[in-house]
Amino acid sequence: MTEHVPGSNSVALGFWVGVGSRDETPKSAGATHFLEHLLFKGTKKRTAFEISAAIETVGGDLNAFTSKDCTCFHARVLERDTELAVDVLSDMVTSSTITKDEYETERPVVLEEIAMYEDDPGDVAQQGWSKRMFAHTPLADPILGTVETIAQMDRRTVVAHYRKHYVPSKIVVSAAGAVDHAQFVRYVKKHMGTWVAGFDAEPIPPRVVSAGLGSRRDRSEPGSHIIKRPTEQAHLVLGVPAFPIRDERFWALSVLDTAIGSGMSSRLFQEVREKHGLVYSVQSFRATFTDTGAFGVYAGTRPEKAKQTVSVIREVLADVASRGLGGNEVEDAKSQLRGASILATEDAQARMSRLGRSELITGELLLASDIHERIDSVDLDAVNSVARDLLTKPLTLTAVGPFDRRMKFDTSAVV
């Protein structure tokens, strides 16, 4: 998948693999992210130093990330170094050696990364909330695994994970910038031709139902959960189950999310920060997957103001659920979404990501005109219908701070 960007002198490219933390078993929890690290450690023809030096010495960037539903190895280089980047990334993805020494050297590095996130109370709150929002499914588990799972995981488990999931049918290669499609395909064929049986195959279909979800619509665990930490600020995450990414109500939810908590003109910012002065940061968000989703709110406040902050947030949600948004709010939110989609096209990395994720996760590539059409099709009634459906459910809340673990927040349905 490629997109030529006129006037660009660089190319952003990514190798997208259809495996994320949600594809792990309890025994392999954290293996996907661990494997992401290991693919930088060496291949049959390059050492770890040679992998990084190959891209960095030509002024490029090389990195990777693991999410709940995919893994991506990506680079950005000058146009003249496009083939080099294809060579390096394909080598990493297809020919990692994962020796015993490399494995044992990298294990403490992954444990240090887990420790780093454990020191961030905002991340702890988000993970604690996910654990209860997606309870009893792999989506509830941390992407990095835990200290316990990584400490006990053996090399054979990670190698088996690599061999099972790093196969041609689960990989999409995308590029954007100063790229010619035919030439790019020749580069990929040259460096992956012996590994790929055919280049005309479609990737694996998007997941329909995640393991453990079954037919249950609401699998969350409503209520409040306290994680006691000696922090100066309380970190609050609260929300409700929502829709999958391909649900017809997804775009109405996007408009609702924007109006409620995206930017300084949003309902939450105006009420919680501007009117009551309770927070520095407050925002809403949506987590969407092919088979499920969630809508939530994050806020950071002084511990003694935590209950009041949750109360004001609930009041905002209750008002939207019962009275709805106004027509001007919906139109402003739609305009904001359209503008953001256009601004995203200014960045080659964002374009590359849109290509790769769209093909791998949903199988549907939306052009800017398609996105604008979907946004424009959302009307006031659709947005307020979604608000009534979602914002009248009991809340799932996680609070991180210097609280008594027996402390309770009001998480009952707001209407």
Image: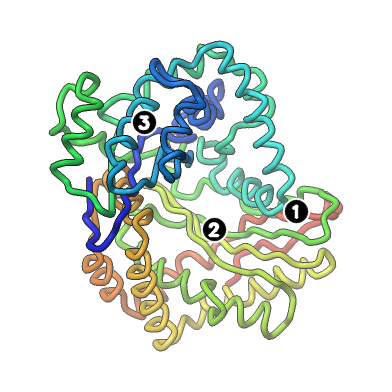
Q: Left or right: 350 with respect to 298? A: left
**Front disc: 3 or 1:** 3
**Front disc: 2 or 1:** 1
Give the class, few, some or many, for how many residues have Cα within 10 Å of label 2's Cα (few <14, many ≥20): many
The span from disc 3 to disc 2 (Cα, nearest Å) is 42 Å
Q: Which residue is mark 2?
A: 240
The image position of residue 220, as x and y in percent, is: 56, 48
Q: Which residue is mark 1?
A: 400
Q: Earlier in the sequence, mark 3 or mark 2?
A: 3
The image position of residue 235, as x and y in percent, is: 72, 59
The span from disc 3 to disc 1 (Cα, nearest Å) is 42 Å
Q: Is residue 163 visible?
A: yes
Residue at image point 29% right, 59% down: 8
Dot 2 amino acid type = Val
Q: Which residue is mark 3?
A: 88
Q: Earlier in the sequence, mark 3 or mark 1?
A: 3
Give the class, few, some or many, for how many residues have Cα within 10 Å of label 3's Cα (few <14, many ≥20): many
From the image, which quarter does the N terminus lie in? Answer: top left
Is there CB contact under 8 Å for labels 3 and 1?
A: no
